[in-house]
Image (cartoon, rainbow, N blue to C red):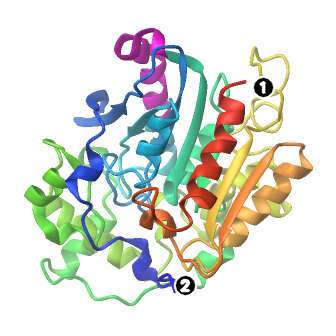
Amino acid sequence: MPDTSDSAFTPTTLPDPTDYTCPFSDHIFATKHGVDLRLRLWPSPVNSPSPWLLWSHGGAFLFGMHEEVTPWVVPLLLRRGIHVVSFSYRFAPQASLEDIIDDANDAYAWCRAHLPTFLGTTVALDSYAVAGDSAGGTIAGLLAQTLTPPPRAFLANHALLDLADPFFRTRGDNVELSGEFDEAEVIAAAQDNDPAHAIITCPSPGRIGFGQGALRRAFHSLTLVVGRRQHLQGDVFTLLNRGNWIDAVLRGGSNEEKHVYAERHSPLRLLGGRGSDGVNGVATNGVNGHGEGNGTRSRYPHPPTYFLHGEADAIVPVEQSRDMAKRLRELGVPVGEYYEPGAGHVFDQRFSNRRVKGYDECCSAAVDFLEVYLRQ
């Protein structure tokens, strides 16, 4: 049975470097407080205007690498004639969720301005989708409701769609710190909000021990850094995960203020799901800024959305995907769903190639759905 424990949050093996051989180019799309924000572009080998997908990586807003995309995503999309862009963003606690979304918006703006330079006539700028896994699904879900022109589709990959879910107040891990740092230093780092101290790369706790050299080779990166700061960030995550790690990206002093902030930055709540009014968050025009009169060509009040989720996910409850799918249907939005029985968080990491059992039912079906709307 797939792992449904919290250890499934972070893969503990490295991919074969040959899994990441698709041609790509790396770019800096912004610099903030001295921190370079980077993205990676994988062009599809096409000869005519083709769609593209903007990917937001996961990692609890505290770790992750934009060079690492869920294994099946890039190869499958490139074969289907869809370009892929994956971007970095600043991590908590130095960055709030608003800061992270600001980084995501800057990545999108860079793509609008520069993809024609690198892809020429092979990119159809308005034919794009947003996607993300776990916490990256929060980012993509907020972009789905705010970008102009709106994305044609949204892929929610075991996405965190409700930051205000009481589930996160009732769980926590009592895991020991690494022992590399005094606990006082870890506590101070967890309370450090100086934006100049932000980082954009931190391998998952299960992988950081492989070291910088092995990780650079695995993900073909000359800029990936694994140093003292990244190891400290790993302990920060461990410390915060003893309570509600989502608090790291929330702003507000009291629990009530943080709850309101969480509601206003949750894709599901912004749609009016789970009893919210759906009007007080980052979305500002109609349900999500896609209404008539704003110059967009959207036929729906929200991009058509495909949900992938493990039914036994111990990190992000599958009910979040089910509830958002239900709400979108109520709004008349096309929805696709794949829920893996008995599967935990990031279950689709196992689909490293097309020969893995279940690949077509999970991965191919998701891209089939995206293509319907990307190619309209």
Question: Which mark is first along the chain, 2 or 1?
Answer: 2
Q: Position of residue 66 (x, y in %)?
A: 34, 46
- Magenta residues span 104-122
Q: Amino acid at mark 1?
A: Ser
Q: CA distance from mark 1 to mark 2?
A: 39 Å
Report crowding for label 1: few under 14, some 14 to 19, many 20 or more residues within 10 A (C-alpha). some
Q: For residue 193, which quarter of the picture?
A: bottom left
Picture disc at residue 298: 1
Under mark 2, the amino acid is: Arg
In the picture, residue 78 is in which quadrant? Answer: top left
Q: Is residue 162 left or right of residue 69?
A: right
Identify the residue position indicated by label 2 in the image.
171
State whether the magenta stretch is mostly helix, strand or loop: helix
Q: Quadrant of the C terminus?
A: top right
Please tell me whether residue 199 is drawn above or below residue 12 in the rendered image.
above
Vertical placement of residue 351 versus 146, above or below: below
Q: Nearer the viewer, mark 1 or mark 2?
A: 1
Q: Is residue 46 above or below residue 82?
A: above
Q: Residue shown at 73%/37% (left/top)?
A: 303
Residue 195 location, quadrant? top left
Nearer-the-camera pick, 125 or 162: 125
Compare residues 199 and 218 and report the one nearer the observer: 218
| x and y, in percent, of residue 235 in the image | 26, 74
Which of the two residues, 281 or 49, is positioned nearer the viewer here?
A: 49
Determine contact: label 1, label 2, CB under 8 Å: no
